[in-house]
Structures are given as C-alpha cells and as structure tokens.
Amino acid sequence: MNKLNLYQTLLWSSFLEEEFTSAIVKCNNLLAPGPNKLLWGHLKRIIKDKTCRANIIVIANACIELEHWPNHFKILIKIVIPKPNKLSYDSPKSFRPIVLLNTIGKLIKKVISNRLQFYVILNNFIYQSQLGGLKFKSTTDIGIALTHFIHSR
C-alpha cells in the first residue's frame, strides 16, 4: 500500500447510518424521480429498513474504497422546460434544462458532500469570508463579515 492510499484509508472512515438518515430528511418527496423511477419518498421508506440501509452504506463504502462511481449512477434524464412568461421561445435562453439523476446515487453524493464539507471546515481549508454554499452559515454571518471588513479599512 503506497503512502497516499494509507493516508486516504486513515482519513476516510466508513459511513455511518446517521449520515444517511440525516442527509435524506430534508429531501423533497415531490421532486421528479431519476432514471431508476425512485422518488425521495420511496427512498425514505426504504432507508428506514435496517437491512436496506446497511446495503446502501455498503455500496457507498465500496465506491470510496474502489475509487469508482458506478455507471448506473451516471445515467441521467434531461428534461427541457420552457421558462414562463417569455414573449418568444425562439432562443435557447427561453428554456431551462433539468437533469434527473439516480436517486440512490444522489443520496450517496449528499453524504459524501456533507462529510467533505465537515473535513474542509474542521481543517480550516476555507477562507474565513467564504460563506456561500456552506452549512450553518447565514445572512447574519455575511453581515458580520461585511461589517468587520468595512471597519478594518
């Protein structure tokens, strides 16, 4: 085992059940399903079953250990929706493409994303004034950072 693989193994521990149960809670049941036709509401019911949840965790851990994202999770459906209240639909800008991905793959990506964000914040890899797209950051935090910036000038 080379040094990089050893470092990755030590740093990245196996996924926990709580990571999946907390990641799926905020998912909207009404969103359109991906190519696997699985709605978030269905996946929420599936993940309540301990055996099913354990199998999804095994898949997620295998993706990390093998450094492989299965093709099944890469298959998508693209839907083009016309934007409302456009005078003309002659321009591509009059439409909004929406990509629908495999729901289980999206859940695993959410868990990976949550963990990466945790590691990045824990190790101070993000500039202090970077607030957009981060959990537990609000407009109040942006206001405080802006006020500090103005007073320090």
Image (spheres, rainbow, N blue to C red):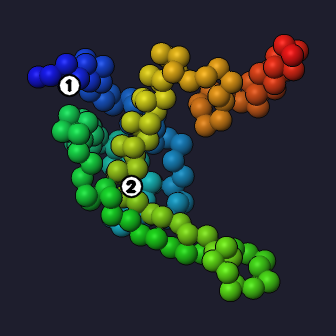
In the rendered view, would you say 84 is above or below 130? below
Quadrant for the N terminus in the image: top left
Residue lying furthest top = 152
Left or right position of 26 against 17: right
Up-down: is 17 above or below 67? above
List the residue tagged with mark 2: 103
Label 2 neighbourhood size at 10 Å, few (<14), some (14-19), many (20+)? many
Instruction: Report the amino acid beneath label 1.
Output: Asn
Q: Position of residue 76 (x, y in %)?
A: 38, 65
The residue sitting at the left extreme is 1
Residue 67 appears in the rendering: yes
- Residue 6 in percent (x, y) is at 19, 19
Cβ atoms at labels 2 and 1 below 8 Å apart? no
Residue positioned 49% across, 29% down in the render:
117
Q: Dot 2 lies on which element?
A: helix
Q: Dot 1 surroundings within 10 Å: few (below 14), some, or many (20 or more)?
A: few
Quadrant of residue 30 within the rendered picture:
bottom right
List x then y, in percent, for residue 71. 25, 58
The C terminus lies in which quarter of the figure? top right
Q: CA distance from mark 2 to mark 1?
A: 29 Å
Q: In this view of the protein, can residue 58 be seen by the observer?
A: no
Task: Between residue 35 and residue 150, name the one nearer to us.
Answer: 150
Q: Up-down: is 91 above or below 122?
A: below
Name the one closer to the observer, 122 or 37. Answer: 122
Q: Residue at x 40, y 50 (%)?
A: 106
Secondary structure of the residue carrying numbered label 1: helix
Q: Where does label 1 land, which residue?
A: 5
Q: Is residue 73 left or right of residue 152?
A: left
Q: Amino acid at mark 2?
A: Thr
